[in-house]
Image (cartoon, rainbow, N blue to C red):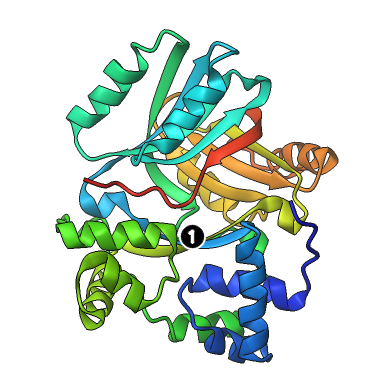
Amino acid sequence: MENITLDEVDRGLLHALQVDGRASFSRIADVLGVSDQRVARRYRRLRSTGMLRVVGVVDGRRLGYESWALRLRCTPDAASSIAEALGRRPDTSWVHLLSGGTEISCGTLQRTPAQRQELLLNKLARTSRVLSVVAHRTLHVFVGGRIGWAGLAALSADQVARLEAGRAYPGHGSTGEPVVSLSAGDEALLRALSLDGRAVHADLAAATGWSESTVKRRMEQLCAAGVLFFDMDVLPPLLGYQVEAQLWMSVPPAELHATGRALTRHPEVAFAGATTGPHNLAASIVCRDDAAFYRYLTEDLGALPAIRQIETAPIIRTIKRAGALLTG
């Protein structure tokens, strides 16, 4: 990995892209008080290294999909290849290889119960080198996706408000609204945005066969319906975070929402969600080093009285994250 030191402009750019992944360089530059050429140059430098990317993400709930978190225990010789195979699947959103190299953590979206059964009961269950599979339905997300990681905060509240006010593709949809159906053109559009969330309208028109005006209008519709949003994915080491881990916590149901909300204020938490199962609160965290990880476990999480039990597993390799796309 290229050794890059971030300055105030870089950090402001990262936070701005978290607020609005498709904000123009000129609008970001205006908020940061620098030239748009400087912002564009910094973005291209970070993107060319693979440390930063903006992706279009599908909110599966608005399409009627089921969200599941899987934990697989594999034979030592097979975990890496199985994790890579899961990463190639279009229905997985993130895939991690955990401590010891024999456990895989994976997030998946399934369109139908039949697809869920095919993956869980047939595909994985019949793979001889998969020793066990534990599947938890993800019920609610506290941090992640639309709700950005607090560890990126670099802008003032006024700067964030200015970016939000000028957002070209605001999302308003909720899970209480009717499920949205996608056309073949929509699928092509979303597939292209999953590769580059900042792709220009001309490239998206070429991918879909639509006109640029149709692309722009359909993106506005999908965002307004809550189907599409834009996520900024950055490698934690770029920000000085060397330790990543997954946590599974047990919390009494009456305290689950309040505890999950408390995690939104922790800059170490990159993802937190309520799930089914005895460990009903899952989280992904990033810390600067082992000492910071220890402090977070004993002090910050230790201060949350509703947490009855915590299981931890360091992430030793990330195969896939941010940008899974379900295709036909």
Q: What residue sits 63% from the left and 35% below the top? A: 317
Q: Residue furthest right?
A: 291
Q: Is 75 displayed left or right of 183 in the figure?
A: right
Q: Position of residue 306 (x, y in %)?
A: 58, 36
When asked about the image quadrant of residue 219, the answer is: bottom left
- The residue that disc 1 covers is 147
Is residue 227 at least partly visible in the picture? no
Q: Position of residue 232 (x, y in %)?
A: 53, 62
In this rendering, is residue 38 above or below 186? below
Is residue 194 at least partly visible in the picture? yes
Along the line of sight, the residue nearer the viewer: 98 or 75: 75
Amino acid identity at mark 1: Ile
Q: Is 3 displayed left or right of 71 in the figure?
A: right
Q: What residue sits 48% from the left and 79% below the top? A: 23
Along the line of sight, the residue nearer the viewer: 201 or 71: 201
Along the line of sight, the residue nearer the viewer: 283 or 230: 230
Q: What residue sits 75% from the left and 50% below the top? A: 241
Q: Position of residue 105 (x, y in %)?
A: 51, 30
The quarter in which the C terminus is drawn is: top left
